[in-house]
Structure formats: C-alpha cells, structure tokens
C-alpha cells in the first residue's frame, strides 16, 4: 500500500481553495479605533463624506484673487491694473471682492466672494504683496478658474469616501482625517489559538531532555498570525495524549476563538493526536507539495481548525501557501505576498508530481537557493527572503531558467 493511500491527494491550488472555504465561516466583528491605530486595519463599514473636499473654494497659490473679467486686455495694453485690498490669510473668512480689486491670498486661503481666478505673486508688478491701495499690474486676460481649488472637486458631501472591506493605508487614513473623523469602525482582528504537538518538544527556556528539541513552531505561527493581523489568544504545547489534547481544546473553545491552528499530529504515525481527536470532524489529506505534504482541516464547535504539519519549515511554508492567502481573501488582511519572476542562479532539479517550495535569497533579478529542500533546515529558511515555487517536473531546471517566487520581505 502507498504511504499516502489513507489520505486523498490534492494539488496546491485545491487545498488553498479548501482552506479558504473553511475560513469563510469566520464572522467579522467590528470595533472603533482611533486613526493612529487604524493603519493596516480593514474598514468595517462605508465611510460617507460628511463634507465636501475641498469644503470651500480656495487658492492653489500664493498670489492675488481677482475677477477674471477685470483683466480683459484694454487697447494697446499688455497688463491689467487693479487696486490692492486687504489680504486674505489662510484660515480667515474674507469679505467680497469688488470690481477692479485684487486681494492678496495665501495658499489654502478662501477665495473672496466674487473672485474667480488667482494670479501668482511672481507674475505681478511691483512684486511681492504691496500695501492696500497700491495699483497692481497683472498679465491681461486671466482665465476664470486659474489656480482655484473648486469646492467639492475632490469629493462631494454624501459620496462614499471609503468602502467597507478596504485596507486602511496612510492615504486613506489621511482622507478620513481630512473629513473630520477622529476614529474609524474597523473589523476586529480574528482571534486564534495555536497548538504544537509532540512529547519531543519543550518550550524555549525550559529544561530540555536528551531526546527533545525546543519548540520553534509556536513562535513561527504566532509571528505569522500576528503579521497577518490575527490576535493570538494562546499558544499551547500538547503532549502525545489524545485525551489531554481533547481537554485542552474544550477549554480553549470556551474562550470564543475565531480560528484554531496546529502544527504536527496530522500524519499516519501512532501518536498523531490532532488527527485522532479531530478525524471525525474533518478531513486529512496529502497535498502534492514538498515540504508540507500532510495537511488537515476540521471544525470544532463551528470554528475552523487548520492543521499543519510539524516540521518547522513545513509549518512556515504551509502557512504562507495556504493560511495567509485564505485570510487575505476571507478577512481582508494581510496584504498578499507579491508573486515575482526571477532567474535561477544555479541549476535545480524539481520533483516529479509535486510542487517543491524552496527557500531562496532573491536580489530582485536572480534567486539562489538557501540551503537544501529539507523541512528541518530552519537556519537556512531564516536566511531566505523568498519562497521559490518549482512546478512538478522530471527535467533539471538550468541556471538562468525563470521561476516564480513569493517575496517575503
């Protein structure tokens, strides 16, 4: 019997879709956060503009507000002559502009009623901002609307300024601030509980036995989930004891998480506690991918449970290939990893029938493998800034061949 005979075999794309469908059950909650805490969050509801942008007509330049009709060319004249009146500083409400007058205005200052153009100060004579009563010379035939920011030209009051589901960038936060919003309604971060299984792992800082290793997976998953905008409620080490795992899971389910994530315990060995406890509630498959072949999906009390393999690099790669993109599609965060094309620095042999995800160092054009393909080579993975996606194949890929990669930095 094949060692994968007990598990269905899926392609990478099929399992990514399965994980995404499992996460669609996450019910987004809303919370209100101040703008300073909104970066990267996902808007929970449309933001309708409470005012127009610009809220009033104002000057785009330091110059003089004029009536364009007053600058019409007189016979034999190259300039129009206007009388300077009191200046209009930014932040002050001006009085009306009468015919034949020019009001000094600063950038952003409201246009006086009656004015419909701004002449930059450097185009006028005698230059600078002379005292009221001075005769000002401006180039003739100024067009109406010149250097005027029209009220509502950027956004009209009542229009949708930002849409629910948009990720809040600095520009979007700035728009909200310009509309007078001190806080925004965003989707609350999903809450996850993380499990690492196995008698062979102990927490960093604990006493390590001669046949034990320090647990890297909980740290990896907690960091990946946090980076993906997920709040990690707890991370537990679970022994190879199905009863202990079931009890731990029941206690954590009472905390109301939105997601469970585990590493290890999903293969066909005698101590696969995740598969033993969750088998009746889900499915365990083999994905045609190396590393990260054994995978599982389940639900506990309606909460999705994503079961990842236990080797550290398998855990890391599986999260990036399956869970991160599923969170992006269903929750709106994190930002997708960019898919790039690079050329191989050296020849690489892919695997027949399986997508191989190698760790690589990419310089923007060429990618070099970081260590071998083994799922235990964590130091090599730490040097990498890309996951190189080698499609199934029998033939060696020569140096210089193009490959796709996910940029991690």
Image (spheres, rainbow, N blue to C red):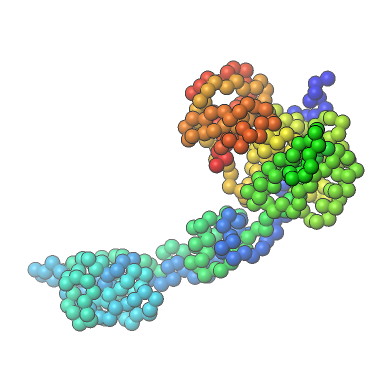
Q: Nearer the viewer, residue 199 or 38?
A: 199
User: Residue 301, image x and y in percent?
Assistant: 83, 50
User: Residue 137, image x and y in percent?
Assistant: 17, 72
Asked whether residue 215 is in view, the answer is yes
The image shows residue 179, relative to residue 399, as above or below, that is below
The quadrant in which the C terminus is found is top right
Q: Nearer the viewer, residue 299 or 164?
A: 299
The quadrant in which the N terminus is found is top right
Q: Residue furthest left?
A: 76
User: Residue 47, image x and y in percent?
Assistant: 57, 63
The image shows residue 268, relative to residue 63, as above or below, that is above
User: Residue 143, image x and y in percent?
Assistant: 25, 65
Q: Nearer the viewer, residue 295 or 113?
A: 295
The residue that appears at 64% across and 65% down in the rendered structure is 32
The image shows residue 175, relative to residue 210, as above or below, that is below
Q: Is residue 151 left or right of residue 168?
A: left
Q: Residue furthest right?
A: 243
The residue that appears at 68% across and 51% down in the rendered structure is 230
Q: Nearer the viewer, residue 304 or 131?
A: 131
């Amino acid at each position: 019997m094949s060692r994968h005979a007990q598990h269905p075999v899926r392609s990478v794309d099929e399992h990514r879709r399965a994980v995404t469908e499992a996460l669609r059950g996450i019910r987004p909650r809303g919370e209100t956060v101040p703008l300073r805490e909104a970066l990267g969050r996902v808007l929970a509801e449309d933001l309708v503009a409470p005012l127009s942008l610009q809220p009033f007509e104002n000057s785009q330049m330091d110059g003089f507000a004029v009536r364009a009709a007053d600058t019409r060319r007189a016979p034999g004249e190259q300039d129009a002559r206007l009388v300077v009146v009191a200046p209009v500083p930014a932040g002050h409400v001006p009085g009306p502009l009468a015919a034949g007058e020019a009001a000094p205005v600063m950038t952003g200052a409201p246009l006086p009623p009656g004015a419909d153009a701004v002449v930059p100060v450097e185009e006028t004579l005698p230059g600078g901002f002379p005292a009221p009563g001075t005769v000002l010379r401006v180039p003739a035939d100024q067009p109406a609307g010149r250097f005027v920011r029209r009220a509502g030209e950027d956004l009209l009051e009542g229009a949708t300024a930002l849409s629910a589901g948009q990720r809040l960038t600095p520009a979007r936060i700035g728009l909200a601030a310009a509309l007078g919003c001190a806080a925004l309604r965003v989707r609350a971060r999903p809450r996850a509980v993380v499990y690492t299984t196995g008698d062979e792992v102990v927490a960093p800082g604990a006493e390590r036995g001669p046949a034990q290793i320090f647990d890297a997976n909980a740290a990896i998953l907690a960091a990946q989930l946090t980076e993906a905008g997920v709040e990690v409620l707890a991370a537990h080490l679970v022994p190879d004891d199905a009863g202990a795992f079931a009890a731990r899971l029941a206690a954590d389910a009472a905390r109301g998480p939105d997601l469970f994530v585990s590493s290890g315990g999903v293969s066909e060995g005698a101590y696969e506690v995740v598969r033993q406890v969750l088998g009746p509630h889900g499915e365990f498959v083999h994905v045609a991918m190396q590393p990260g072949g054994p995978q599982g999906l389940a639900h506990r009390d309606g909460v999705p449970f994503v079961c990842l393999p236990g080797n550290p690099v398998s855990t890391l790669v599986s999260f990036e290939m399956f869970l991160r993109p599923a969170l992006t599609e269903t929750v709106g965060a994190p930002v997708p990893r960019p898919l790039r094309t690079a050329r191989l620095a050296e020849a690489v042999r892919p695997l027949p029938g399986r997508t191989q995800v190698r760790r690589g160092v990419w310089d923007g054009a060429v990618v070099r493998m970081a260590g071998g393909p083994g799922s235990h080579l964590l130091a090599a993975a730490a040097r990498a800034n890309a996951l190189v996606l080698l499609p199934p194949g029998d033939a060696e890929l020569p140096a210089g061949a193009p490959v796709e990669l996910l940029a991690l930095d």
